[in-house]
Image (cartoon, rainbow, N blue to C red):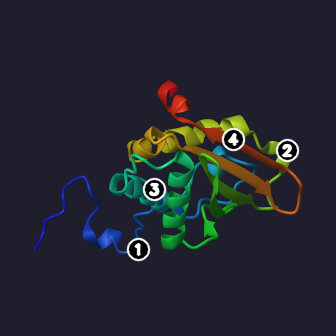
Amino acid sequence: MSTIPPSEPSAESTTTQSTDPNTTKPKQPKGFRKRAVCAAPAVIIAALAVFFLLTRGLFQSVESKVQSAVQQVRNIQHFPVQVDSVTSLTGVKPEGDAIRFDYLISSSVDPSTFNPETIRSSVIPKACSVEMKDVMDAGIKLKYAYTFEGTSKSADFTVTKADCATS
């Protein structure tokens, strides 16, 4: 019988608790909140991190590494992935020297409330996490593309290793 450390909730209170914060549904937002589209699900970040730890291809081009990383993610993750009540990650694809994450934002969100810079600043901490260090060190950029369901409104931004050095 194992003991539960004091910092963790008791076993009885964890029977329905999810360990992945991206699977819990927040309260329905009144407006667009920066948390609504803050980052790729943890499973994708973990997959990319493991991939680069295991396959540090010293003689591969950055584009080749991007292709391999995207294929690895596609092998373990099926899309779309519901990120929160208004955002879905619809796919991951290679785009030159960047891994592109495509998001779809629900039509219940007013596109005029979307501020790409606010979202970018909330994504950078996860994109620049320790788990993603090898990805960034390999010269790979992370591109985040958001499309609003039922409209032509879209926005995208890219996170680079230089962004991580300043954050």
Q: Nearer the viewer, mark 1 or mark 4?
A: 4
- Tell me what residue is drawn at x 12 percent, y 69 percent: 2
Q: Find residue 81 and report its image quarter.
A: bottom right
Q: Specify the quadrant of the image occupied by residue 148.
A: bottom right
Q: Amino acid at mark 4?
A: Phe
How many other residues sit within 10 Å of disc 2, few (<14), some (14-19) or many (≥20)?
Answer: few
Mark 3 belongs to which amino acid? Leu
The percent coordinates of residue 48 (x first, y second) are 45, 56
Whether the residues at callouts 1 and 2 have beta carbons within 8 Å, the answer is no
Residue 91, labelled with which disc? none
Task: Using the image, tell me which numbered label, if any, was put on residue 16.
Answer: 1
Position in image of residue 155 (x %, y %): 77, 46
Amino acid type assigned to the residue bearing label 2 in the image: Ser
In this view, 14 is above or below 100: below
**Residue under circle 2?**
112
Q: Nearer the viewer, residue 94 or 149?
A: 94
Which disc number belongs to residue 157?
Answer: 4
Distance between the alpha carbons at the discs numbered 1 and 2: 37 Å
Q: Which residue is mark 3?
A: 48
Q: Earlier in the sequence, mark 4 or mark 3?
A: 3
Q: Sequence order check: which comes first, mark 1 or mark 2?
A: 1
Give the mark nearer the N terminus: 2 vs 3: 3
Whether residue 116 sits left or right of residue 56 in the image: it is: right
